[in-house]
Amino acid sequence: MELFSYTTDENVAIVTMNSGENRFNYEFFEQFHKLLDDLEQIDNLNVLVVKSSHEKIWSNGIDLEWIAKNMEKDGPGFFEEFAVEMYRLFNRILTYPMITFAAITGHAFAGGAIMSCAFDYRYMRDDRGWFCFPEIDIKIPFTPFLNAIALKAIPVRKLNQMQLTGERLTAEECLKDNIIQKICTLDSMVPEILEYAKTLVKDKEMIKKMKAELFSDIVQVCKDELAKHNKSL
């Protein structure tokens, strides 16, 4: 099954996540990295847009059922190995040498919401979809790297409230705290992103350098987290 598909429009790559709730597992990571590899090699592309084909979900984060089965078989160390791969993907999105848009076409929960924070811009659907960190209820604490990614997009006072309560935010509430940049209807979201994205004809090497400097502290936190597990980027 192809978990991702894409089209292009001038300088913009429009990627669609196609695995239903778009939950994270090794196949999701592998196919996402492969697609990012391919798009990076296309010279005229310098904007990445990621949306979902699901009618009401952008991404619900970690595939908890898959994690539980593998932990039952391989022990608790499996989750640590999985987390390393999740960090690598989030770090890659954060530093990707293109200008990135999360087209949040439905719910963004847990790891899905954190992943959206790694993007440069977030546009969110007006009539359906929550933005939520339910980790306090599913008993998965934020790590330093996940906090660093979230704080890139969310004011610390709001992130504190979201983490401790697990509250579900609407698009209007997200916009109030500048977590997202724009609210759109489902049908207008990609056209509105494209209208702006097509004006962003920027040099990819400069985008890469700018992000490397801007996000150097977050990248270092990622490296430190991976080093705890004797891994590297």
Image (cartoon, rainbow, N blue to C red):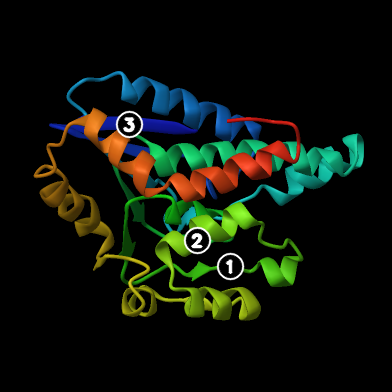
| Horizontal side of residue 204 vs 39, given as left or right | left
Disc 2 crowd rating (10 Å Cα; few below 14, some 14-19, many 20+) is many
Q: In the rendered image, which residue does mark 3 sit on? A: 6
Disc 3/disc 2 C-alpha distance (Å) = 26 Å
| Horizontal side of residue 166 vs 121, given as left or right | right
Choose between 24 and 47: the one closer to the eye: 47
Say which label, 3 or 1, has the lower sequence index: 3
Q: Residue at x 17, y 31 (%)?
A: 203
What's under tag 2, amino acid-wise? Ala
Q: Residue at x 50, y 33 (%)?
A: 3
Disc 1 crowd rating (10 Å Cα; few below 14, some 14-19, many 20+) is many
Q: In the rendered image, which residue does mark 2 sit on? A: 150
What's under tag 1, amino acid-wise? Phe
Q: Contact, CB < 8 Å: mark 2 with mark 1?
A: yes
Q: Please indicate, yes or no, whether residue 98 appears anywhere in the rendered image.
A: no
- Count the marks: how many? 3
Q: Please indicate, yes or no, whether residue 160 appears anywhere in the rendered image.
A: yes
Q: In the rendered image, which residue does mark 1 sit on? A: 133
Element at badge 3? Answer: strand
What's under tag 3, amino acid-wise? Tyr
Say which label, 2 or 1, has the lower sequence index: 1
Element at badge 2? Answer: helix
Disc 2/disc 1 C-alpha distance (Å) = 10 Å
- Residue 10 lies, with reference to residue 56, above or below; the image says above
- Residue 231 lies, with reference to residue 140, above or below; the image says above
Q: Residue at x 46, y 76 (%)?
A: 169
Q: Contact, CB < 8 Å: mark 3 with mark 2?
A: no
Element at badge 1? Answer: loop
Disc 3 crowd rating (10 Å Cα; few below 14, some 14-19, many 20+) is some
Q: Contact, CB < 8 Å: mark 3 with mark 1?
A: no
